[in-house]
Image (cartoon, rainbow, N blue to C red):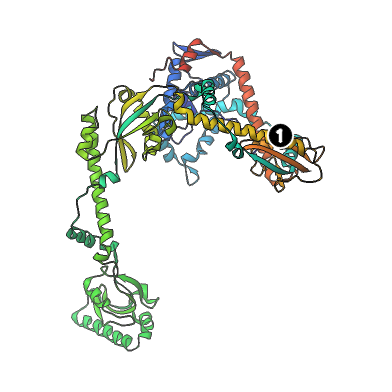
Amino acid sequence: MFDFIRTHQRLMQLVLLVLILPSFVLIGVSGYTNYVSGDHDIVTLGDTSITQQEFDQARSNQLRQMQQSSQGGFDPAVLDTPAARSALLESMIDRRVLAETAANERFSVSDTVLRQAIAAMPQLQVDGQFSPERYNDALASAGLTTRDFEQSQRGEMALSRVLGPVSYTASVPSVVIDKLGLALTEERTVRLLAYPATEYESDVQISDADIQAWYDKNKESLQLPEQVSAEYLLLDEAAAMANLPQVSDEELRKYYDQNKARYVQPARVNVSHIQVNIPSDATEEQRKEVLAKAQDLAKQAQADTARFAELASAESQDAGTAKAGGKLGWITQGAWPAALEQVVFALKPGQVSDAVEGPGGYHVFLANEVQPEKGETFEEAKAKVEAEVRRQLGADRYADMATKLTSLVYDNPTSLQPAADELGLKIKSAAGIARDRLLSSDEVGANAASASEDAALLDDVRVRRILFSPAVLNEKQNSGVIEITPGSMVVVRVAGVKPAHIPEVAQVSDYIREQLKDERALLASEKAGQAALADFSKVVEEVPEGFGTPLEVSRINSQGLDKSIADAIFGTSTDKLPVYIGVNGPQGYVIARIEAVKPGDENNVMLAALPFQLNQALGQAEEQAVLQAMRTAAKVTLLPEAQEALAGENDSQN
């Protein structure tokens, strides 16, 4: 929320499946006192060390976790940098220092505390209660034993007790919080007058000599990374749908009939009934008596349909519907036996049927409401049916083409042409693909991948990673099939490689011209603004022409002002008002006229989280200070081999 509050977080935090197990990520399954030393140390500290083998294993675990969490969309190049390797090594050193301290000072966790902590993990609970079954399933899915997991958790909790009390007990004095709250909520009334740099661009003149001079001075910043031009085959729904055979009317009608419920709502009737049961052991005479009773009830209902509910309640032997006046609800055609449907669907609204034999006995039906069949005829739905049939044919063809594509690019590893010819696909090409991005059209020229309709596909991290893999980059082999989405896949091969280079001045002259224009327009804006500022400083009573409406700004509500402008406003003395200040903003020079100051309010609702944030920030700062002191006491030493590891010179993964 506040600019001055900086939350300090460790750069690398990894999640193992559903359980937070940093010790597994960094050094595998072990207790906090159990570390395996190798014969190639890269860091020494206290009585232990970190070996090259441990560092390599930590990098492998880190990469695997990142790839799993991003479902294959993580670019390993992000971690293959000195900065990333250094951050990982630093985290390993910190962890080892904590482990050594915990072991030397005999920090421990009781069995009771351990059980309580594990039982409180949400991932191991069902309906808010610890579930032994969930616990065992979670460990099994992670490939861990109960002993290994509980040992690691005991170690984690012991480690947390080394620095935990430092951060938990940190507290910023209330007087500091109050004064800071007043400073944050102090409001200043300002008017602004901007001198947009764009207004001065038309006066800027750039010569070829200017461009050459800028190029000579800044050409190193223009260096382009190694890039490739690629050929690729794209198989997607559009490719699979192309050139599908025509579907005959006969086939379309067959599909319509088989899926008629999707286009036509069948007829339905809202019915009530009176049921007279036939005993299971009824004689013929008894059956006649039941029929006679049902026929009599039918005649009574037909004579006065308004009495149907009354008759059903009094006479129907279907206990489930009798209480509701015999109401059965909506019956859709095709849901009942044909004999009953023939009677029911022949009724008109308000009409009562004769007695008809059905399940359980004889029934008398009343049609409360009738809805005829409605929907689209075949002719009306023909276009929709054809689109659905073609879509299904396309899906089948896509699956077949995908199988063939996989085989064809494998059988012809150095050319995409056989696969293109066999499947009727077009070989596409694009240039300017770097390891970390697609270069712009200005940087590449014609056929830039970034300007292609397939730019999003070519910028996919999986595509770029494969293009720079050894077999594809150096041997110009086809890649395997890369599934981008469930409905699209691509095969790529490198057509050409352009090493990292600084482009010629002619290639970047337009870019340099724009840079110079922006720089000089900003300078012109600043010059004009400073000249006006000198005059405004003499104006006290009246507001000079051009200034906007007053704004009430504070440090916690800057009204959208750029940070450089807001900082200048609050960094200016207000002993004498009004006061004018000038500042270079991102869009040009800005003059601010500060007219009034309103004291801050320490009870402002926007300060509610301030004490917590300050205490948290202080706790993290003190925690890091203590950790640094512990590192000093442990005499942490990076050996020469560590620099090689950080530079990637001993990288066993490559």
Task: Measuring from the top left, give residue 153's x and y in whole percent.
Answer: 50, 29
Q: Nearer the viewer, residue 533 or 399?
A: 533
Task: Measuring from the top left, give residue 447's x and y in whole percent.
Answer: 36, 34
Number of marks in the rendered image: 1
Mark 1 crowdedness (10 Å alpha carbons): few <14, some 14-19, many ≥20: some
The quarter of the picture where the N terminus appears is top right
Task: Measuring from the top left, give residue 386's x and y in whole percent.
Answer: 25, 57
Q: In this image, 551 relative to 496: left or right? A: right
The quarter of the picture where the C terminus appears is top left
Residue at 56% across / 14% down in the picture?
A: 636
Residue at 58% across / 19% down in the picture?
A: 101
Q: In this image, 14 relative to 628: left or right? A: left
Above/below status of 309 relative to 630: below
Hey, which quadrant is residue 103 in on the image?
top right
Q: Nearer the viewer, residue 443 or 133?
A: 443
Q: What element does badge 1 sit on?
A: helix
What residue is pinned by disc 1? Answer: 530
Q: Nearer the viewer, residue 518 or 34?
A: 518
Q: Name which residue type carries label 1.
A: Gln
Task: Measuring from the top left, give residue 532's x and y in whole percent.
Answer: 72, 37
